[in-house]
Image (cartoon, rainbow, N blue to C red):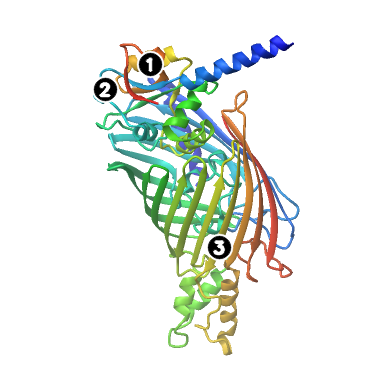
Amino acid sequence: MRSLKLMIAATVLSLASLAAHAELVVIVNPKNPAANLTAEQVSALFLGTATTFPDGGAATLADQPESASIRGDFYQKATGRSVAQVKATWARLTFTGKGTPPKELKTDADVKAFVASDPKAIGYVDASSIDGSVKAVLKL
Amino acid sequence: MRSRFPLVALAVAAALPSLASAVDFSYSGFSTAAYGQSDTNDASVGYAAQPGGIDSGGNFETDSKVGVQVSAKFNDVISATVQGVGYADMTGEWEPHLDWAYLRLQALRNLSLRAGYLRAPTFMYSDSVFVGYANVWVRPPLEVYNLSPVYQIRGLDATWRTTVGPVQVSLNPYYGDSEVDIPTGTIDVPEWMGLAATAEYGSLTVRAGYSEVELGDVTNSQLAPVINALRAIPSSICGGCAIESNRLDIDGSIIHTINVGAQFDDGKNFVAAEFGQSSTQSYLIVAKTGAYATYGRRFGNFMPYGTYAQLRRDTTTHSDAIPAVGALAPLNGAVNAALAGGAGDQDSYSVGVRYELPSFSVLKGALVKLQLDHIDTKDTKGMLNAVQPDFDGTLNMISASFDFIF
């Protein structure tokens, strides 16, 4: 019993330290001229107040699944809002024809593949998933 | 207007399958199941002059809605959207309406144009007021949102966006006509135009709106005999009769609405405040000024909120433009009876709580709201409907809603 408690405690601790160290990056297609983006610029795109990159090019947004913890981390760090608040914002935009919510993909690999294949795309993944197929423009 | 809706729906439905292979379809919906009950049977709470509002008998009709939207994106430039919404309109009947049906053209990177049936952005949340999941309250503060009797426009709008330093700016002009269903028939709206300007900077949104609505033919106007009688009197006998007749006639009335609003939402604190003023010479619609302020604070999934709202009537409550004695006295009485029927001052105080539910199965998001309202009409009829002589001027109301998107 005692050893079970210890194990649980150890697991919780290691998960907590993992979460604390998890770094996420915002990625765009390598053809995107932006070298980096500010958290404000990323926030404006993912809250629907901006529809284009700073150079004026249209943006296509990729999201992670609602069940993934990275989604909550991303919105908290980039926009200061919870996943639920962001959903309410997109509901308002969707039903008034002012925007289309981000496309929800299943995994980091899916987001990366989507961004790698579309010059207009922007998404976010765990920093450890990054490779040459995409360009990191912001660390959160 | 309803009779013209099916034609648009049929045309869009007929056009879609043939294009389906190249088209990106999306489906989504929203719903609010709401119950409201007050402590009096001597007045009811509802939208504009809607019959069958909330009273001590309680009802599900006034605030409940269900909407379904289908969008078809043909390419990066052209898309079409149809949104059907079931709700109780100004006739008091809960029935389906085709609220939005438009073609959208992304003409330039920062300019989009739409044509069809649209909801006009008269006030800050006018176009999304039915999407309960996106809003803080069970219902929008009626002291502002009841200022304009029309909400749906058939015509064109444009949205132009630009960035000024760190500020996102958008301009949204619109133009068209409309028709309003009322219990006794319809009111024609031959011309309606407006402009909404919005600036967003971080957590702060500021907007201003202006609109001009011209009203036309009214079917079954009960005041027609009085209006005709006034117009038949030579101005040498009654100098004020012609002007008074115009003020009783909905046809030809113009309503100018100005609106200024601000919203601040930093994720923790939510503040929204709006001011609206509708000016008109009409004795039936009457000129009004309304305002509200809402504050809410989030604690995890809970958000308690409070609202103060007020409405002030700007049109006189009594007119002696027609002599009150002699042969014209009955007409003076008819004019003053009409004036007495219009809205009066009211203050309202609301507190509520909004609770976000964990999302489950097909629902993309769901929440429940509970709201208490205290309305004080300061011995007038306020913005209430079906006000009885026994009404003591105040009412308390409880409302609960379940709002979700799918």
Q: Secondary structure at mark 3?
A: strand
Observer-side mark, 3 or 2, equals: 2
Tell me the quadrant of the picture where the C terminus of chain A can be found. top left
* Residue located beneath label 3 in the image: B310
Which residue is at 74% across, 69% downward?
A: B390
Q: Is residue B354 above or below residue B192?
A: above
Which residue is at 52% across, 65% downward?
A: B285
User: In this view of the protein, can residue B63 be seen by the observer?
Assistant: no
Q: Are marks 3 and 2 on the same chain?
A: no
From the viewer's perspective, is B37 left or right of A121?
right
Chain letter belonging to callout 3: B
Q: Amino acid at mark 1?
A: Phe
Which residue is at 66% across, 13% downward?
A: A6
Chain letter belonging to callout 2: A
Tell me the quadrant of the picture where the N terminus of chain A can be found. top right
* Residue located beneath label 1 in the image: A114
Q: CA distance from mark 3 to mark 1?
A: 51 Å
